[in-house]
Image (spheres, rainbow, N blue to C red):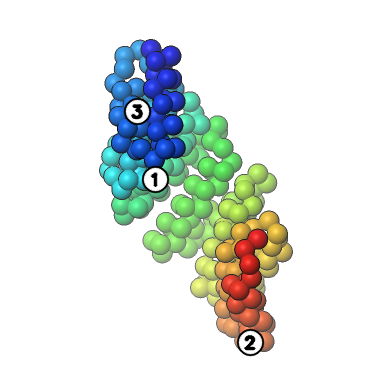
Amino acid sequence: PDLTASTLFQEAILQVNDGDAGAAITNFDTVIGMEGVSAEKKSDAYFNRGMLRDEGGDLKGAISDYGRIIAMSGVPRTRLADAYFSRGSARDELGDSAGAVADWTAILDIVEASPDTVAQALFNRGVSFKDQGNHVRALEDWTRILATTNAPLDIVAKAGLARGAVRRILQQLEMALADFDFILAHPADISPAIIADGYYNRGLTYRDSGKFTEALADWNTVLELKDAPPR
């Protein structure tokens, strides 16, 4: 059964690449309904069908598919982490913040989860806490990312930007400036959009600190970045 399932799965992937999501979902349906297919193959089919449903706007269907993976036994732990992350994102999009936070929290107990997945889960959970008004928990999550050595630099930069923005709201202006300075010290390794946000938010913090010359300089830099050709 696994050989047949693999053939159908590869055919579905080609259909996805060709833009034929409907045909791909049909093949994933077949794999899911087959007897004797390994948990790994079946979870792959559920996950890819979930992603297609997610991209197609069927968030409840996607949540159901990710939930099937989470409920299965014998699923590779990395796939389990991916399912929790994707279900959390879909729940968040539907407005289920508590469900999203629960899913992203579950990832932190999966030691096999990739550093990228863990960092993104912490970042997203921090955003949810901030949106709930829980600045303390949000700052804790973003600080945890900044303390790691293996998180992707763009996620680290997003965490620093978010932490600095909340610290500015809390009038912790010197610490906010330190966060923005950290981001702006790595311009070649971070996306231009994050760099521009760093200058903009540092300008706001300078303004709040009464340093208007520095604020104007940062905002002028934002305008220069906007006009610069993409790198």
**Along the viewing direction, whichever of 157 and 50 lies nearer the viewer:** 50
Q: Residue at x 43, y 20 (%)?
A: 6
In the image, is residue 135 above or below residue 18? Answer: below
Left or right: residue 82 versus residue 115 is left
Can residue 229 be seen from the camera position used here?
yes
Left or right: residue 80 versus residue 111 is left
Q: Position of residue 4 (x, y in %)?
A: 39, 15
Q: Which residue is mark 3?
A: 28
Q: Which residue type does callout 1 highlight?
A: Gly
- Circle 2 SS class: helix
Q: Residue at x 55, y 33 (%)?
A: 111
Of badges 2 and 3, nearer the viewer stands 3
Q: Quadrant of residue 204?
A: bottom right
User: In the rendered image, which quarter contains the N terminus?
Assistant: top left
Answer with mark 2 or mark 1, whichever residue precedes in sequence.
Answer: 1
Q: Residue at x 60, y 54 (%)?
A: 154
Q: Which residue is mark 1?
A: 88
Estimate the spatial distance between the alpha carbons at disc 2 and disc 3, rounded to whole Å: 58 Å
- Circle 1 SS class: helix
